[in-house]
Image (cartoon, rainbow, N blue to C red):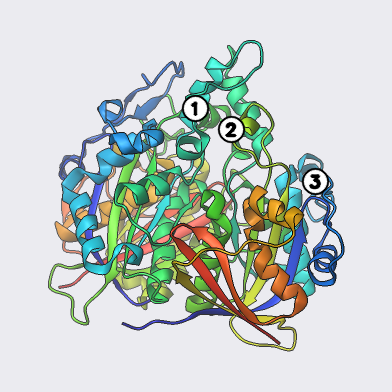
Amino acid sequence: MTPLLISSYTATTCLGHGRDALLAGLREGRSGLAPCAFETVKLDTWTGEVAAVDAEKLPDSLARYDCRNNRLARLGLEADGFADRVRAASARYGRARVGVFLGTSTAGILQTELAYRRRDPDTGALPDDFIYRTTHNSFSLAEFARAYFALEGPAFVISTACSSSAKVFAAAARQLACGIIDAALVGGVDSLCLTTLYGFASLQLTSTTPCRPCDAARDGISIGEAAAFALLERAPETPAAGALLLLGSGESSDAYHMSSPHPEGLGARMAMAAALRSARLRPEDIDYVNLHGTATLANDSAEGKAVAELFGDRVPCSSTKGATGHTLGAAGAVEAVVCALALSNDLLPGGANTATLDPDIPLAYLLKSRPGRLRHALTNSFGFGGSNCSLILGVAR
Amino acid sequence: MTSTPLAAWIEGIGFLAPGLADWPAARAVLRDGQRYSPAPSVLPPAAMLPPAERRRASRIVRLTLAIGLEAAAHAEADVSTLATVFASSGADGYNCHALCEQLASDDRQISPTRFHNSVHNAAAGYWGIATGSMAPCQVLCAFDASFGAGLLDALGQVVVDGQPTLLIAYDSEYPEPLHSKRRISDCGGVALLLTPARTRRSLAQIAVTPTAGPAQALADAGLESLRQDIPAMRSLPLLANLARREPGVIRLEYLAPMQLNVALQSC
C-alpha cells in the first residue's frame, strides 16, 4: 500500500487518560488491572476499567447518544488534543472529505442490558428513554463521532469482534487510495458490559488473576475497556524525520471455528505475511511485534507458532494486554497506538504480569521494557469468527 | 492527489426478501412488472454447514449463505477463494434478545454458544466455516446506510487490492420488545459479486461517486416500502436497472447528506 501519515493519535485505557499515561505505564511495566467491581457483576475476575467514564457528559445536542460507550469515546477523543486535530482536518479538507471508520464489538449494548431490567411489567415493553439507534446499534459509535465533529463524509463501523479496530486502518487506507476522502478518523471503542464479562466467563476464558500473556501458567483473559484513535492522511513524498506512518496491512480468515483460533495459527500467519507484502518489507525488517497475546492457552500457543514460523526467535515481541486488559473491539487501535509510542520513544515495551515464559512459545518475549531504536513494528489482532488483521507501522528516520 | 475511480464489474447477483425467494423472482418483478406481493421470507436450510451447525443455524446465517451462494453460482465463482464484505444493520436479533433477557434475570450464566453467536460477525464466521475461504472478510455496520457502506468498502477491495469481492448486505428482524425500538419486519438481503476486470460473465459495470443530491425512491409503493423497511433493500433502485439491463445513473441512499451516484453500464 501507499504509506499513510499518522498525523495524530491517542489512547485512553485503564492506565489513564491519554497517551502519556499509557507510555508511562508501559515504561514502568505497570498493570492497570484491578479486581472486577463493575456494575452489579459478580465474577471472580480482573478488569481494566477506565476511570471516570460515567462522569463524562455529552453535549446537550448529542444527548441521544448518551451511553457508557459514547462517554468513553468522547473522553478518548478529547485527550491529547486529538479532537482539535480532527477539527483542523475538517477545516482543511472539507467536512465531506474526512471519513469516520471505527471498530467496536459491543458498542452501547450495556444500555440495552440495563433497559431489560426496566421492562414494563404488563406489556414487557422497553422504557421510553431507551434509544436503540444511538446507543445499542454498532454504528452508534461512528454516528456519534461523525455528529460530534459535524462531518459529512463516508462512515461505518467494522465489527469483527477483537480485530475490529485494526481492520478500520485497512478500510480507511482503501478509501484514501480511491480518493473518496483526504483524511480518516480511525480507531476503536469498547466498554465494559455484562454480555462480554459473563460471555467470556461462560467460555471459561477469563482468568481469576491479572492476565499473564505467554506465561507457562496463563489461564485466560482480563477484559478491559478503551478508546483509541488515529488520524490518517496522505503522506508527503519525503516525510519529516520522526513522522509516523502506516506502512501495511494484512487480513485473513481462519475458516475454522467460531471461538477457537486455528491451532497452527495458519490464518494469523497469512495475515502477517500479507501485511509484510503490503508494506514491501521482509521479516527481518520488523523490530518489534505487538502480539494479540490474550493469555488464553489456545491463542498464545497458536500465535506463538505463527510468529515463530515467520520471524524465528529473533524479533522482540510482547503482549501489552497484561497492562491494559483485553479491550476487545478497541484492542487493535490501542495496540497500534502502543506501536506508535514505541516507535516515537525508542521503547521496546515489555509485557506486564508475565513471570515465566511458556517454553512451548519460542519467541524473544520481552518480560521488561527496555530502550531500543525501532524502524518498523507489527501488531496482531485476531477475533471470534476467525477474523485476523496485522498492521505495520513505521517511523521516518 | 492520485485517485482511482471506485468501479467494478458485476458478475453475479443473489437476492432474498419477503415474497421474493431469489434473484430470478426479484427480476420478474423489477423487470417484467410482475406484481410484488409481500409474504414472509423463506430461508433455505444452511446445507453447506456441517450437520451440528446446520441444525442450529440462525436466520441470518441461512439468509447470508442463501444469497452469497446464489451470487457466486450465478458468476460460476469458487467461494473458497472469495474475499467478502458483510454489511448489516444488526446481528442475530433473537440471540440478542435471549442474552439481554437472561442477563436481566437472577441467573446470568449465559450459554457459551449464545455468546459467540452474539458477535456482529457471526454470519461471516459461519460463512468461513461453510466455504473454507481464508480470504479477507469485512463485517460492517452503518445502521440504515449499511448497504452503501458495504458497497464503498467492497469496491475499495476490488480497486485497491485487485481481487474479486463478494458483497453480502443483509438484515433480520428483532423479536419484541426490541422490535418496537427497531422496526425491521423480516429477513432480506442482496449479494453482488464484484470483479476488477470484465469477463464473459460480466453483467454490468458500476462506477460510484459521492453526491449531495437526493436519493432515488421507487415508483411502486410496495417496493418502496420494502426499500425503506430493510436497510439492505436500499439497493433496489440499482437492482431495478440491473434487472432491466438498463444503463443510467442511479442515486442510492447512503448517509445523509452523502448519497452515492452509481453510473451503470450494461454488458
Q: Is residue B78 visible?
A: no
Q: Which residue is mark 2?
A: B181
Q: Secondary structure at mark 3?
A: helix
Q: Amino acid at mark 1?
A: Phe
Marks 3 and 2, how far apart at CA: 30 Å
The answer to whether the residue labelled 1 contacts the one labelled 2, judged by CB atoms less than 8 Å apart, is yes
Q: Amino acid at mark 3?
A: Arg
> Which one is in front in this view, the residue at disc 1 or the one at disc 3?
1
Q: Residue at x 69, y 56 (%)?
A: B224
Placement of the C terminus of chain A among the 4 image quadrants: bottom left
Marks 1 and 3, how far apart at CA: 35 Å
Q: Amino acid at mark 2?
A: Lys
Quarter of the view holding residue A322: top left
> Compared to A206, does A292 lie above or below?
below
Label 2: chain letter: B
In this rendered view, identify the residue nearer to me: A192 or B145: B145
Quarter of the view holding residue A49: top left
Q: Residue at x 21, y 67 (%)?
A: A92
